[in-house]
Each structure stands twice: as C-alpha cells, then as structure tokens.
Image (cartoon, rainbow, N blue to C red):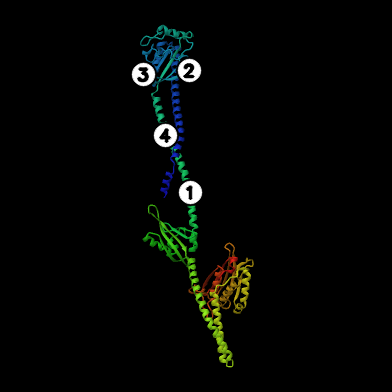
C-alpha cells in the first residue's frame, strides 16, 4: 500500500509544475553562468594586461638603466628586446614609430617593416592598452601596447644600428633613427615610439574553455539540483496534503467504526485484537483497554473465535446466529458475520467480526408470539365463559332453591350452601377471564405518581404488618405528573405487591422505587422482594393466563399486569433468581392525551 501511495504521489505531480520550475530556474542559472564566464574572462584579461604592462615596464627600466649607466644605443636595445621576447608566453616584442614601422623587433627580419598602417597605428597612448590580434596561422595574440618612453628628457648614447640587416622602409635608415633618438635626447618632440607586447593566448584560451566547461557543468548541476529541490517541494507539499487527507479519512473511518451500531472486532495477522469498538464493548461486556493487543483466542468468546476455523477452509464470509458466553458468564444470542482480510497481493492481514445482539430481537419475537397466543386464548376463553355462565346461573338457582327448601336438614342445607359458594367462585373466575379477554378503555389523565404509589402501599400495610414484612419506599416528592390511568395502574401495583407478600416469609423486605428520566421522557417503577424467586424455566411463562405455582391462585394477576402496562405502551422487565428474590421493573413512556379512549 505504501508503494502504491508513492506511485500515486508521483503521478499526481503535474508536468506544468516541472516546466514552470524549469522556466524559473533556467534564466537564473543562465544568468549566473554567464556572469561567471564573463568574470573569468575579465580576470584572465586583467592578468594578461598586468603581465604585458609589467614586461613593458621592465623593458623600459632595462633600457633606461642601459642608456643612463652604460651608454647603450640601438644595438644594445635591440639585443635586450630579443632576450626579453624569449620569455615563456611572449610571442613578440615590437617598437614602432608613429607611422607604424618597426624600429626594433624580436624578429630582426621585421625591423624596418611596417607593423601597423599609419591609420591603424596608435596615437598618443600614455597608458597601457590592449587588444586581440590575429597573427600568422590564424592564431590570436593578446597584444599590450603603450607609448615607449625609456628616458624622457635624457640624452641618448650611440645610434640604433641595423641588427642583421639595414633598416628598411620609408623614412627609416641610420639618419632617421638617430634623429628620433636625438630629438628625445634634446628634449624635443620628435617622432613618437610605441612598444607592443604579443602574449600567447593559447593557455588563456585553454583555461577559458576549461572554465567555461566547468561553469556549464556546474550550471547544469545547479539547475538539476534546483529542479530536484523544486520537485521535492512539490512532492513534499503533495505528500503533506495527501497525509492530511489520509488523516481525515482515517479519523472519519475511526469514527464510523467506533460509532457503528453493531459490534466490530478485528485482528491482525498474528491473531491479536487490533480493533474493538464501543458497541462491541457493550455487547461483550468488556473494555477495549483490556482487549486491544491481546490474543483474540483468549479474550473473545470461544464460539466467536471458532468461526475462524470455518473461514480457513471455506475462505468466504461466514454468517451465523450463535449463543455466546460473555466474560461475565451471561448467555448472549448474537448474529455474527466473519471474514478474512487480505491485501492486494493476497497477503493475509487478519480477521474481522461484525455482530449484533439478538437479545432484544428475540425478546420482541417472544413478545409477539405471546401476544398472539394470548389473543387466541382470550378469544377462546371469552367464548367458553359465555357458554359456562348460563348453566351456572341455573345451577346457582337450583342450589338456592334446595337450600331454602331443605333448611330443616342441616347437612343438606350446608351442601346446598357449598354449591352456591363454589358457583359464585367459578363466576368470579369467569368474570376475571372475561375481564382479561375484553378490550378495556384507559382513562388517561395527569397523575402524581408519588401519591399513587404511596396510596397503593397504604392499602397493603396491614397485610405486610401481619406477616412481619417491612416496606421500604424511595419515591421522590418532586416527580412531575404523568399521563396514565390511575385506577388501572393501582390495580397493577396491588397485584405486584400481593405477589411479593405471598412470596416472602416473616422479616422479608418489600422495596418500591420510582425514578424519572427527563432525557428519554420515561418513568420507572421498581417493585422488588427477597422471597423465593422464580425458576428460570418459569420466567418466560409468568405472564401467560392461568400460569401459577400457587395452590389457590388463578394465574391471571401478572397477565393482567402485562396487559395494562402494554396498553400504556410501556415495558415490563423481570429479573429473578431462585432463593434471592424477584425484581419487576415497569417502564412507562409519557402518554398522549389522545390515549383517553385507547383500547387495552
């Protein structure tokens, strides 16, 4: 995934960004390179000019010393010029007159020859000048020149004689040269002399080419480095943006996983828990701080982890409904989807489990089934009750007749009286059955729950006192009014109280608590006892009609309780353990005024 992200990062680099960077860097590098080449050329030129000027000064100094101290003439100056020209990198030395004819030359054959045309010959030049000239063979020479003044105002000794051959050319000869020297000697302004130094440029050209090559190479290197830096900046910016986007996606994914309404557990390739969201914590009754990083086989329910064996053989998604045991030992029905995680190259990454708690679903299913069963039973009971009640009236009438007729016979009279009592008891049972089967109307009105509970407790205080049972109540006085049917709710509470009293012996405790959840708009009433409790097998049947463990019970009390609470759109929850008592919780949502005529 990392290599793929890097590949995508390179592909995301726009060619226009590269071209733009090149367009910005190229002129800058070209300018710097040109400046460097120009500076190198100027430095080399300055060195050659300084070298030429030094040669001219040294030649003038030598000539001055020779003429002043040893009475040199033209022959000695010519010899000095020839010897000076033998130094390395000196191509030639020439002294000309103002007409451009050589009066002294490092090549004696050139004496008297025209070195410069009169038009091209330098004029009054008292400072060192230079230029590049083309010599024989097409080569270039760096020529430094100035006016030649070896002994300004000093007499010349001797003459300029011909060295190797006579001076040739117009105006040149022994007399001409002597006149030039004599003019200087006498302090007159005679014909001016100029000295030219030709320096070899091959070394400079080689150095210049090498410097240019080095500068070009350095410029290309700088350009490439600059381009690499610019591209790196673009890539760094792109990487930063990609990292930021990835962080947002990661945060979003984490939030989605964390707030998923289903439990999610993921493991890595080593079988250790890598993800454990809040829903999984609530369902499995464990904390992610203790689970994350641990071996999944040791901390997850065995039934859940065993699905990995099927995944190893089946290789696809596995979906099942399982009854799992949580870490606290409670049974838990779950619908689980499990799958293996694999990378792009089919590398195993781990497992993921997504599960949903089916406890509420199964409870609702049981509730629906029970409601259907009760509806069928109620319809049957109503029909049977009507059929039984008519004969009972006749039986009661005949029993009354025989009791009055046989009043002198005590045994017969008592028998008739017993018949009447049993008929009346049976009639009451039928009445309760009809009451259970018949839809009843709720009379909803604002009711103070605190007053309702306290009033219902007063009704059973005598029975509780008679059995030595203590009543503990926790009913806040500031509870708001709730829309309920107070008569039906009193019937519910009395049924629950009486069941608790019958389940307890002396020194038992009956607890009643009322609380309010304003956020969810719920009122909760809890009735608890420390009696014998209810067997687990019986708990799912306690709301069925005629289900009872009491010898003299009808089995309709809790069925009516459930029916009334259901009519209030509430919920009844039962928690009981044998020998530890029973807790029944009534959860009542806020009802609407329109329920005044709702059917129970």
**Residue 597 in view, yes or no:** yes
Which of pointers 2 and 1 indicates the residue nearer the eye?
A: 1
Q: Position of residue 119 (x, y in %)?
A: 43, 13
Q: Judge whether 226 appears above or below 537 on screen.
A: above
Q: Quote the CA–CA distance across marks 2 and 1.
A: 72 Å
Mark 3 or 4: the one toward you: 4
**Residue beneath disc 4:** 220
Crowd tier of the residue under label 4, counting other residues whose Cα lies within 10 Å: few below 14, some 14–19, many 20 or above? some
Query: Disc number at residue 293?
Result: none
Q: Position of residue 447 (x, y in %)?
A: 62, 68
Q: Closer to us: mark 2 or mark 4?
A: 4
The reply to whether discs 4 and 1 touch (Cβ–Cβ < 8 Å) is no
Image-quadrant location for residue 148: top left
N-terminal label among 3 and 4: 3
Judging by the rendered image, the residue that carries numbered circle 2 is 127
Above-or-below relation of 386 to 352: below
How many angstroms separate mark 3 from mark 4 (CA)? 38 Å
Residue that appears at 57% across and 88% down:
401
Q: Earlier in the sequence, mark 1 or mark 3?
A: 3
Query: What residue is disc 3 on?
Result: 136
Q: Is residue 510 visible?
A: no
């Amino acid at each position: 995934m990392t290599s793929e992200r890097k590949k995508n990062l390179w592909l995301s680099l726009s060619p226009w960004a590269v071209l733009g960077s090149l367009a910005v860097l190229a002129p800058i590098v070209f300018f710097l390179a040109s400046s460097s080449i120009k500076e190198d050329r100027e430095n080399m030129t300055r060195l050659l000019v300084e070298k030429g000027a030094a040669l001219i000064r040294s030649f003038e100094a030598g000539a001055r010393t020779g003429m002043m101290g040893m009475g040199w003439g033209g022959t000695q100056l010519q010899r000095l010029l020839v010897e000076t020209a033998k130094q390395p990198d000196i191509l030639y030395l020439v002294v000309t007159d103002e007409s451009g004819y050589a009066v002294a030359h490092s090549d004696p054959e050139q004496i008297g020859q025209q070195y410069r045309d009169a038009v091209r010959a330098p004029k009054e030049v008292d400072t060192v000048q230079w230029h590049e000239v083309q010599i024989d063979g097409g080569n270039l020479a760096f020529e430094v020149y100035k006016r030649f003044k070896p002994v300004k105002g000093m007499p010349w000794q001797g003459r300029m004689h011909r060295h190797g051959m006579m001076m040739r050319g117009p105006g040149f000869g022994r007399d001409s040269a002597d006149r030039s020297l004599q003019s200087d000697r006498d302090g007159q302004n005679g014909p001016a002399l100029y000295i030219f130094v030709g320096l070899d440029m091959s070394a400079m050209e080689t150095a210049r080419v090498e410097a240019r090559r080095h500068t070009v190479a350095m410029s290309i290197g700088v350009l490439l480095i600059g381009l690499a830096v610019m591209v790196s900046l673009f890539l760094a910016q792109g990487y930063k943006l990609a990292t930021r986007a990835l962080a947002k996606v990661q945060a979003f994914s984490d939030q989605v996983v964390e707030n998923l309404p289903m439990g999610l557990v993921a493991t890595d390739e080593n079988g250790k828990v890598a993800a454990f969201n809040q829903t999984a914590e609530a369902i499995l009754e464990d904390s992610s701080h203790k689970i994350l990083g641990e071996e999944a086989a040791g901390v997850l329910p065995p039934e859940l982890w065993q699905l990995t064996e099927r995944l190893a053989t089946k290789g696809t998604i596995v979906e099942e409904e399982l009854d799992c045991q949580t870490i606290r030992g409670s049974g838990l029905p779950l619908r689980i989807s499990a799958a293996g995680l694999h990378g792009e190259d089919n590398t195993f990454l781990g497992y993921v489990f997504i599960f949903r708690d089916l406890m509420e679903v199964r409870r609702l299913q049981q509730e629906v089934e029970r409601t259907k069963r009760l509806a069928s039973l109620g319809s049957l009971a109503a029909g049977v009750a009507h059929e039984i009640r008519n004969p009972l009236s006749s039986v009661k009438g005949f029993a009354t007749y025989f009791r009055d007729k046989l009043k002198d016979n005590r045994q017969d009279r008592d028998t008739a009286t017993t018949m009447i009592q049993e008929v009346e008891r049976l009639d009451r049972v039928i009445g309760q059955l009809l009451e259970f089967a018949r839809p009843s109307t709720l009379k909803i009105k604002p009711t103070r729950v605190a007053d309702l509970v306290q009033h219902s407790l007063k009704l059973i205080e005598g029975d509780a006192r008679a059995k030595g049972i203590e009543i503990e109540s926790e009913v806040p006085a500031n509870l708001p009014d709730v829309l309920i049917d107070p008569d039906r709710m009193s019937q519910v509470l009395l049924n629950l109280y009486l069941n608790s009293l019958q389940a307890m012996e002396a020194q038992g405790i009956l607890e009643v608590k009322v609380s309010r959840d304003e956020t969810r708009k719920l009122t909760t009433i809890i009735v608890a006892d420390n009696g014998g409790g209810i067997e687990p097998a019986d708990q799912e049947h306690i709301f069925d009609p005629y289900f009872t463990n009491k010898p003299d019970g009808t089995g309709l009390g809790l069925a009516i309780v459930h029916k009334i609470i259901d009519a209030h759109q509430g919920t009844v929850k039962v928690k009981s353990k044998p020998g530890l008592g029973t807790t029944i919780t009534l959860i009542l949502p806020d009802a609407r005024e329109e329920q005044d005529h709702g059917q129970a």
